């Protein structure tokens, strides 16, 4: 397995790019740990597949280098980089048996037959296809075929990294959950370096130790699920992670006092906002308390979601979401307070000040 260094990578699909907008990937400069499980998460078109293809060698970046364990592999093919890939749709040999499909990448590398047999049988157990080993792959369902693709990616233990591009799209919801848990277990057991592309936050947050959030051709934050929830570095991370997403309210700041409409909130620090245009306060709906204390709100709608309810309201002329316990009493003249430790201040969309 390898440590992956993305050394000042940029990529434009068109010739002679002029501005940032012409780049599918703007500058990316990061090092990913050997044995880490990373999820690349972001909306359609943000550059996830472009970055994955640069790591695998399917695409040469317009600028920068990619290194595996410090060795420059920018000009090496996928095969020479020794990468396993699992794509959105199954890539298997229909006319081979399930067993032979799994054995294929090992036979290709000259692994001795007894070792192949041991590893293929182990993988058949993991993907729950032992009873199907002797069947031709063409008779299988789409789910089962994709399980073979996953198995083919995981059966080799000599790869530098395993890359997954939305591999569970064709899998039914219950099986998705099962396979995701199995991937996580395999990662713990074998310590593969894994990079997993998805636009589904649940998938990213359950699979990865580190989630790489991408937006508009940039990595806006790399963090644990808890870090992304508690301290979103960019307002996009706040909106994108969490359901409902973070409340982001236009604000003004004077020293340590934030003003939203006519309401004033004191911080225990004075954010450095010199020379910045747009100021916003971010607070997650889980950290807004509703009751009879604090600043007035007017309620628009209440959505019951089981043990909790989501209150949609208007605060200082701005829409705001609040998560409350199912049995929380909401007074006829409701008011809100913000948990001071959960307030984030953003200057031109990037978080400023405060610890963490
Ligand atoms: N072969 C190509 N030629 C030109 N532009 C491309 C090509 N492939 C991707 N792009 C553009 O590059 C940008 C990033 O695309 P990319 O496929 O990497 O995003 P993504 O985050 O993987 O999206 P999705 O989730 O829809 O797959 C998009 O604006 C896309 O239109």
Image: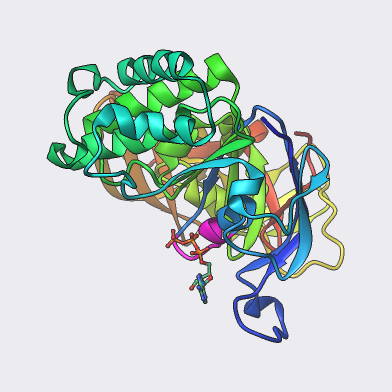
State whether residue 70 is above or below residue 113. Answer: below
Quadrant of the drawing holding the N terminus? top right
**Snapshot quadrant of residue 9:** bottom right
Which residues fall within the magenta stretch? 44-50
**Snapshot quadrant of residue 354:** top right
Depth check, front residue: 61 or 101: 101
State whether residue 188 is above or below residue 39. Answer: above
Depth check, front residue: 327 or 177: 177
Residue 69 can be seen in this image: yes
Q: Position of residue 73 (x, y in %)?
A: 74, 51
130 left or right, relative to 347: left
State whether residue 347 is above or below residue 56. Answer: below
Magenta span contains residue 355:
no
Depth check, front residue: 321 or 196: 196
Residue at position x 48%, y 50% from top? Answer: 240
Q: Position of residue 321 (x, y in %)?
A: 41, 46
């Amino acid at each position: 397995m390898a440590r992956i260094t993305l050394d000042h990578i940029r990529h434009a699909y068109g010739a002679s790019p002029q501005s940032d907008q012409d780049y599918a990937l703007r500058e990316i400069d990061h090092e990913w740990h050997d044995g880490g499980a990373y999820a690349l998460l972001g909306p359609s078109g943000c550059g996830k597949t472009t970055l994955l293809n640069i790591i695998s060698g399917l695409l040469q970046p317009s600028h920068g280098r990619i290194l595996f364990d410090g060795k420059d592999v920018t000009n090496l093919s996928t095969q020479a980089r020794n990468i396993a890939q699992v794509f959105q749709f199954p890539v298997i040999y229909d006319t081979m048996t399930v067993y032979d499909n799994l054995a294929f990448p090992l036979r290709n590398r000259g692994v001795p037959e007894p070792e192949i047999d041991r590893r293929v049988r182990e993988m058949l157990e993991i993907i729950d296809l032992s009873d199907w080993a002797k069947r031709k792959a063409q008779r299988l369902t789409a789910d089962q075929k994709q399980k073979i693709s996953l198995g083919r990616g995981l059966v080799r233990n000599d790869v530098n990294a395993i890359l997954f591009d939305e591999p569970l799209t064709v899998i039914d919801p219950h099986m998705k959950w099962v396979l995701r848990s199995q991937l996580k277990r395999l990662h713990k057991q074998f310590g593969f370096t894994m990079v997993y592309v998805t636009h589904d936050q649940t998938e990213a947050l359950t699979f990865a130790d580190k989630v790489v959030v991408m937006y508009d051709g940039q990595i806006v934050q790399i963090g644990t699920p808890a870090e992304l929830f508690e301290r979103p570095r960019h307002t996009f991370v706040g909106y994108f992670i969490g359901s409902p997403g973070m409340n982001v309210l236009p604000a003004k700041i004077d020293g340590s006092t934030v003003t939203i409409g006519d309401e004033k909130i004191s911080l225990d620090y004075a954010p450095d906002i010199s020379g910045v245009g747009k100021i916003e306060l971010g607070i997650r709906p889980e950290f807004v308390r509703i009751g009879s204390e604090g600043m007035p709100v007017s309620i628009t709608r209440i959505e019951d979601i089981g043990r909790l309810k989501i209150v949609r309201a208007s605060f200082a002329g701005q829409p705001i979401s609040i998560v409350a316990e199912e049995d929380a009493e909401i007074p006829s003249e409701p008011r809100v307070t913000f948990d001071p430790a959960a307030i984030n201040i953003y200057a031109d969309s990037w978080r400023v000040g405060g610890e963490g």
